[in-house]
Structures are given as C-alpha cells and as structure tokens.
Image (cartoon, grey):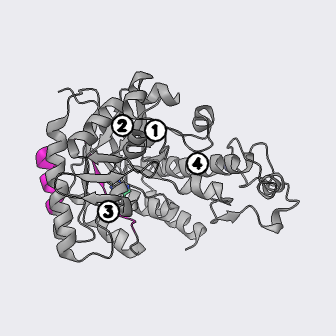
Amino acid sequence: MPAPVRFELLGVDTRSNARRGLLRTPHGTVETPVFMPVGTQATVKGVVPELLRACGSQMLLANTYHLALRPGEEVVRSLGGLHRFMAWDGPILTDSGGFQAFSLSDRATLTESGVAFRSHLDGSLLDLTPERAIAIQEALGADVAMVLDHCPALPAGKEAVAEATERTIRWARRCQRARTRDDQAVFGILQGGSHADLRSECAERLVEIGFDGYAIGGVSVGESPEEIRKALEVSTPHLPAHQARYLMGVGRPQDVLDAIAAGVDMFDCVLPTRNGRNATCLTRRGPVRMRNAAHKADPRPIEDGCDCPACSRFSRGYIRHLFLADEMLGPILASVHNLAFLHRLVRDAREAIGEGRYDRFRAEALEALGP
Ligand code: PRF
Ligand code: ZN
C-alpha cells in the first residue's frame, strides 16, 4: 500500500525534543506542530470554513461515534464524503469512538469484541468493533483514521490500566487487518497511563504492527499536570522519529507547550471553542472573561496585537454586549479568537524550533500565561 500520509521531519530543537515537520495528506500539507479544531458533528461549532481558514486552521478533527449515529456514515458517503459534506477541503482526522466509551461510559458496554453504545439520541444500539470503527471511518473518508482504543477510567489500578493497554494492542491489530483504503492513513493509539513499562511495551507492539503515525491517548483525563508530563516523557522516546506523534484531547496552552518540548507534533481539543462559547478568551497573559463588567466600555480588542477576524474589527465592549444580549455572534467571535490564539501559539513554536530557541520561547510564554 502506498503511504497515504507522509511525515517529513524538518528539524529538532537544540535544547529540547521539540520538532518541526510537514504532514503530507491527500488534502494538502500541514505544518507541524499543528493544533486541530474539533468538529465533532462535522462542524466546528459556530465557525464556517472561511473563518477557520482566516484564523489559521490547517486540519480538523471529527468524531466517528457522533457521525455514525447522525446522519449515519452512508449519508455522509452519499453526499461526497466528509470533506464535501462539511465544505472543508483541507485535511481531516476522525477519532475512532474509543474515547466516547470513556466520556459516555454510562451509555457504553465494553467487551473484547468492542464497545456497545446505547445512542445518546434515541437509545438505539451502535456496536463499535475495531472492524466497524475502520469501516465507518473509511465511509466518512477522512485523511487520517484512528484505531479503536480502550482509555481506562481514572482512578485505575495498574492492573486495570495494563488490561486496557493489552486490549488496545489487540484492537489495533484488528483495525490494521480491517483496512481496505490505500488513500487513508491509520494512526495507532498508545495507552498505559503514567506507567513507563506499559507505555513502552504498548509503543513497541504498535510499532511492530506498523501504523502511519502514533497517538498518545489516555492523557489529560483527570490527572495532575505532573502526571501528564510523566506520561509524555515515557511515551515519545519509544515512537519512531520519522512518523507523526499526536497527543489526543490536549489544548491547554501550558500543556501544549510542554508536549511540544517532549516531541509531540499534533493536538486537538474542544477547549478554544468550548471556552469561547462560555465567554472565556485565551490571551498571552491567561484567560479573559468577556462578561466581566470591566470590559463594558473597553475599546480594545480581546487581545492587543491579534490579527484574527474578531480582534481586527471588534472591541471588548462590543463582544461583552453580545454575550449579555445572548447574541450568537458573541460565541462565534470568541471561538474564532481562541482558535487564532492556539494556531498562533503553535506557529510561534514552529518558528522558535526552526531557530533553535524553543526552550526560551516556552519559558517566556509559560511565564506570561501564569499557572
Ligand atoms: N483515545 C481516543 N481519543 C481521545 C483520547 C483517547 O485516549 C483522549 C484522551 N485525552 C482524547 N481523545 N481514541
Ligand atoms: Zn483575536
């Protein structure tokens, strides 16, 4: 099979493991490190494709579980596939649904065969086996599909984490065997919590099976920042240098900066859009709450110097007014700014890595962000 996505490592920072690269996909080339906005239901909530482009989005994420239930992968396929369906012609990655077994655990039953979901929409049954997860993602037609994995609920004893890790490896093998498309990449997913031996074992076995890239799963599911750092530290050294590494569900600016230093190339998170809908805006100096009375007559943009579509035209006073009046443009503008903020953070990181000064860039950015 020809490799549907190719990662080209452009350079590694001198004093950290931070990397710059290019991810070539059938829908274009992505500069890494990259942040992927989340479009669970084939839409990044409130943000049309033109605005996504304008705020610097390169690649989007969508969700297998949600789209299989509604509108159904065959509807998406019949409407030309996910890119055409949502009018985004850039690269797309679909998550497998493995994480929904964790986040919607009261609706999911996990067995060796797969995950059985009772739909959150109408109670109907979705039997998500590794084979079915691949078939759905092939019908959706994303550039990158993810294997079905088992992300254990925390707190979990080592025994339980080990069991989830072994199941994840078995499911990864079944996913690899189920593939029929040569124009779609599949990434393996590492589990293993913050246990060095489980992470390295999992990485080794997934690399043996052989995937187009590797994701680090089971991180940022309720652990401390210290545990997050440890899980990263014990994972990235076991992954092939010349393939993409993707940290799933992480988007807190501080965590992104740490993960880039550990050698991660790709991120996704609902944080910028979810916080935006809640009137919380990301800035270099930490979060700004747009409903705050302090912004009532503030003529400044959300963030000084930001050239995003929200900051280039609208004042804090106006955006606060939109939120207080419950106008839908408020969440839209805040989401657009937050996405632009994360895209700029990783763009500045890419530049700093290219110039061999990522360590200093990270220290200064963390200092400004605060805890
Ligand atoms: N597995 C999958 N998707 C995910 C995660 C995971 O462990 C996480 C954990 N942070 C986010 N999204 N398949
Ligand atoms: Zn802005």
* Residue at numbered disc 1: 59
In the rendered image, the vertical position of residue 329 relative to residue 302, given as above or below = above
Label 1 to label 2, Cα distance in Å? 10 Å
Q: Amino acid at mark 4?
A: Leu
Label 4 to label 2, Cα distance in Å? 20 Å
Q: Nearer the viewer, mark 3 or mark 2?
A: 3
SS class of the residue under badge 1? loop
Which residue is at the front of the view, 286 or 123?
123
Q: Is mark 3 within 8 Å of ligand 1?
A: yes
Disc on the earlier residue, 1 or 2:
2
Q: Is residue 87 magenta?
A: no
Label 4 to label 3, Cα distance in Å? 24 Å
Which residue is at the front of the view, 278 or 198?
278
* Residue at numbered disc 2: 23
Disc on the earlier residue, 4 or 1:
1
Label 3 to label 1, Cα distance in Å? 22 Å
Q: Amino acid at mark 2?
A: Leu
In this image, 282 relative to 210: left or right?
right
Q: Is mark 2 within 8 Å of ligand 1?
A: no
Span colored in magenta: 201-221
The answer to whether the residues at label 4 and label 3 have Cβ atoms under 8 Å apart is no
* Residue at numbered disc 4: 339
Task: Pick the quarter of the image with the N terminus.
Answer: top left
* Residue at numbered disc 3: 218
Residue 172 visible in the shown view: yes
